[in-house]
Amino acid sequence: MPEIRVTPLGAGQDVGRSCILVSIAGKNVMLDCGMHMGFNDDRRFPDFSYITQNGRLTDFLDCVIISHFHLDHCGALPYFSEMVGYDGPIYMTHPTQAICPILLEDYRKIAVDKKGEANFFTSQMIKDCMKKVVAVHLHQTVQVDDELEIKAYYAGHVLGAAMFQIKVGSESVVYTGDYNMTPDRHLGAAWIDKCRPNLLITESTYATTIRDSKRCRERDFLKKVHETVEHGGKVLIPVFALGRAQELCILLETFWERMNLKVPIYFSTGLTEKANHYYKLFIPWTNQKIRKTFVQRNMFEFKHIKAFDRAFADNPGPMVVFATPGMLHAGQSLQIFRKWAGNEKNMVIMPGYCVQGTVGHKILSGQRKLEMEGRQVLEVKMQVEYMSFSAHADAKGIMQLVGQAEPENVLLVHGEAKKMEFLKQKIEQELRVSCYMPANGETVTLPTSLSIPVGISLGLLKREMAQGLLPEAKKPRLLHGTLIMKDSNFRLVSSEQALKELGLAEHQLRFTCRVHLHDTRKEQETALRVYSHLKSILKEHCVQHLPDGSVTVESILIQAAAPSEDPGTKVLLVSWTYQVRGGPRPTELSSDVTTPPCPTLPTSLPLP
Amino acid sequence: YCLSGHPTLPCNVLKFKSTTIMLDCGLDMTSTLNFLPLPLVQSPRLSNLPGWSLKDGNAFLDKELKECSGHVFVDSVPEFCLPETELIDLSTVDVILISNYHCMMALPYITEHTGFTGTVYATEPTVQIGRLLMEELVNFIERVPKAQSASLWKNKDIQRLLPSPLKDAVEVSTWRRCYTMQEVNSALSKIQLVGYSQKIELFGAVQVTPLSSGYALGSSNWIIQSHYEKVSYVSGSSLLTTHPQPMDQASLKNSDVLVLTGLTQIPTANPDGMVGEFCSNLALTVRNGGNVLVPCYPSGVIYDLLECLYQYIDSAGLSSVPLYFISPVANSSLEFSQIFAEWLCHNKQSKVYLPEPPFPHAELIQTNKLKHYPSIHGDFSNDFRQPCVVFTGHPSLRFGDVVHFMELWGKSSLNTVIFTEPDFSYLEALAPYQPLAMKCIYCPIDTRLNFIQVSKLLKEVQPLHVVCPEQYTQPPPAQSHRMDLMIDCQPPAMSYRRAEVLALPFKRRYEKIEIMPELADSLVPMEIKPGISLATVSAVLHTKDNKHLGPSPQPETLPPTSGKKRKRVSDDVPDCKVLKPLLSGSIPVEQFVQTLEKHGFSDIKVEDTAKGHIVLLQEAETLIQIEEDSTHIICDNDEMLRVRLRDLVLKFLQKF
């Protein structure tokens, strides 16, 4: 029985280092190749030794697909391809291909230059890795090899985020990556057609949350920022350079313009300028509104937002700073956080999800005394706010997507176990779709039923179509034919054609039965009497009297003959060919094809 | 079905597997050459042209027809020659496939007033730039309202009397005025965006796929295929590397039919050489203090020209010469060109990854070397400095800002007009401006396939049949000795012309169905010859979405599984009609007799006949005639015996 096997190497009942292995019809595909933000040791990368202990990865994987540029989805890519060794194709969308190397380089810098880690991938490795990338268009069907094809759908989450459909023959899997079902200020909503995959692998970051309307959250956010700066406080918004940052920038930018505020807004790191530039060049990936207006005004050219300099952090007076990274686990955002944490006027707004183990996660869970490096204890007096601006689908969105794609099975990844459990039940109850949530390293095996495509000769098809007297196209009909299997070529043709093609002759099998009648009349008259009798009792069948004196009942031929020795009896020769009722199951030719000879005529002639 | 006579602006309809597909809807704009230009500013010269009168002095047409240097023009709103609308009921068209933005200009005519209810498929750049072209066209014509709409001359009897080329113009009665912006928007709203290599299912019957054609941003060739047949539609393709993504040739292989349209219109000119000529003529004129006018479309070749100039003007020491790009959509066109990174060639794509704008005209704009204006009114008049280079439309010289520059600069021999667009004959375009003092240079740049490339392409992709407009099957009339300027392939290309219907030479013989696993399990294949196995299939055929999903096993044995089919089966089990199985093989007599004996028949007599044998079972008064292809059992009315005999006979035969 064919089957689909799925093994998460990362993101199984967890968020971070997304990496899922899928085996489908003999093809092995790796979905995403991410790192884990919460760890700094070996656990940050997926355990690729699971795939193979000593062989080359290239021999075991047909392709790698990266859903979007977030590091928890692509962070381990150079390690995987260059240090572990993989030379096969890596698929991602154009924006992902453009932005991914920059984030990787940034990540590398923090790890190597700041933390002084050795044995990390190098810039050259990132470049080499990116050379293996094949960019895909949305909805483009990419033929990885003769059988395996992949297709990208818009996912919304960040610029260039995509969902991927992986298809081999009639089996298919859809991997969502991260997605968002509600359009936001700069991106559209995820969309997929009713592709009915065997399996849908979906993220479940917000498996239990149903978020209130976007507008409310935005208003809340603006109010909090506004109040804080009014009171002279500083607002820190830790973000990742690309994605949420742009949305919040657009939000603040329009708000500042409307309210005519003069408080400075800064955006840290040199990345931003570049990042915004990417958004400008990849306008087709953004939402309708931006696409329509970009000619007049490119939304990503900000007026109020300026680049941040480290010295600004100590400036007096209110300000708003966007700083990277988003989970306060390293870099500039953490530096600024440490500087500002002691002042209760200040505020930090966490706009996204924080992985366990990061400072962001700690302060969100209410911890107010943080142990920093070097045993310092940092007391957090500033206000801590959490606002979910992450562009992940919430429970409603996930259900909606499952409904859209109509999969046979659902598999949850990229979420916390407890929340997954809840969503799993919900999916199974409400949508009646079986649902799985494997942990890392655990394999889910799904049997699939495989139909075999065959070519049917048009002649046969049309004949069968015509057989149904009513031109009712949707009615199922009985089809009888012969399947010719030659090498791997399957064709269904009518039996006659099959014989002809193979040069086989048809073998006629006829039966003839002698029935003795006592009848002194002439043969023709006997036949005529047989005919009229049959005609009267077999109203449903076609009874014919042929010119040569014989009678036919459908395909049965009846002839009357007079044996020379006894003119008083006539012999009825009833002759028919071998027939079967309805298909291959031979029906007993009923014993009374001709009933025992009665003095006058056979009483009945049941037909086969 | 061919609805357009213009080989470069095709409009064909393909009927395939009960699906009606329109391939492109190009608008033949050469008809506008018969009209007088629409000046932006009152032109005393144009308005004072003498009226034209018939030879007998009858001047009733002098309001409509004007004469200028021996040519007669219609003084009216320009009209376009539409694709044929009578040949086929356009409301039955299911889909329209657009290959590039030049080939969609007739779209509003087709979708808006014919009862068309289908879908249009095109790539995103095609739609966006197509919209710009249409917008420009509408704008050019609407901003110069002309009260007069001439129709008298169209009368067949009168048209006969007119001088050439008006006399020979085809289908003048169907010529239509330009559409409105509203119609454009409505037409464009029917378009569904597609990406290269996207497989689009049409009613489950056929699959269409756009492929990169390398000619323009987002330009595509289309593959229309079912499981067993493949039609390729090649329209406006280019093998040259300019800015768009290179052409995808590999996917065109194994086509049953290849429809070939949109070849180069100037087969003798080499685009690279023309660009060089363009640059040198431009430099020459500007150095002498003259102005250069380049009539062009707002998108396409202009990007390449600007890129060339970007490199050229510095080396030629002309960096101070202003470049003006005047079009209602100039800004949009330049902006749009920068955001379609995914549709560009590899070089340009990698620029975006840096990130930098893919086209250097961004830098030209930043450094103020290139300026763009919506029209000559407004800011332009303040900034205008001479000598300069002006890019503006429309290439037909009949409307748009170019008309103004022709009037303005035409009298000075210092100035030059350089024609780069190949769609219009430059002599005809210039006719209403004669006499003209300015220099005219003709360097048409047409990157579409030329005939040498076509034969290379055909060799490569090996289609079974080639179909093309009749113009391509003979050398161009002006150069009738150039036998190389035609399509040469085996078997000879099938040609079509306007308003002609062509039956494509292939027969559909097979259709795809799927056998459900339960049925597959129940099949018993027999190996007849080495490598060939046969199995009898008797099953229920389900038809859904034009996909033959069945067959699934016999109704009796069908388990009520598999969601999709469940409903149908329980509804109605089809009638079991009597089926006649076929038998094959022959019966070896000796073995047969042995078998009979084994089964208790004694007293068997075998007689040889001419064709075979007769086996007599004397005890049972039964006669069995065995020939190579038939067996005949003759016996008395003893059913038991018959069944026994039948089963024995069947053992030796194969059943289908």
Image: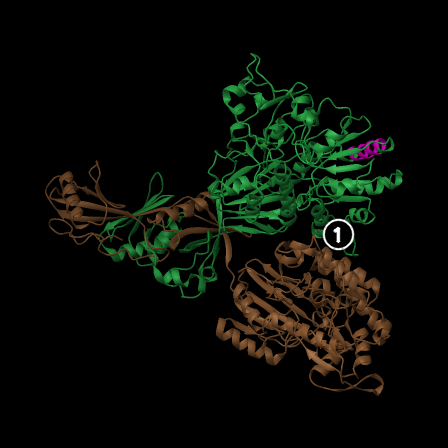
Chain colours: A brown, B green
Query: Is B502 placed left or right of B616 in the picture?
Result: right
Between A23 and B478, which is closer to the camera in this rendering? B478
Between B394 and B461, which is closer to the camera in this rendering? B394
Q: Which residue is mark 1?
A: B349
Between B354 and B231, which is closer to the camera in this rendering? B354
Magenta span of residues: B273-285
Query: Is A183 placed left or right of A98 in the picture?
Result: left
Work out whether B144 lies above or below A168: above
Q: Position of residue A443 (x, y in %)?
A: 62, 73
- The subunit carrying tag 1 is B
Q: Position of residue B26 (x, y in %)?
A: 59, 37
Residue B8 falls within the magenta-colored stretch: no
Name the residue type under label 1: Gln
Residue shown at the point (70%, 82%) measured from the top left: A364
Q: Is residue A488 visible?
A: yes
Q: Which residue ends up furthest to the top in the rendered image?
A: B56
Q: Main secondary structure of the magenta part?
A: helix
- Total marks drawn? 1
Name which quarter of the figure residue A199 lies in: bottom right
Residue shown at the point (64%, 66%) measured from the top left: A177
Name which quarter of the figure residue A181 lies in: bottom right
Work out whether A591 lies above or below A495: below
Residue B278 falls within the magenta-colored stretch: yes
Q: Is residue A136 visible?
A: no
Q: Position of residue A316 (x, y in %)?
A: 83, 76
Label 1 sits on a secondary structure element that is helix
Work out whether B262 lies above or below A365: above
Work out whether B336 lies above or below A312: above
Name which quarter of the figure residue B5 lies in: top right
Q: Callout 1: 10 Å neighbours few (<14), some, many (20+)?
A: many
Q: Position of residue A269 (x, y in %)?
A: 81, 67
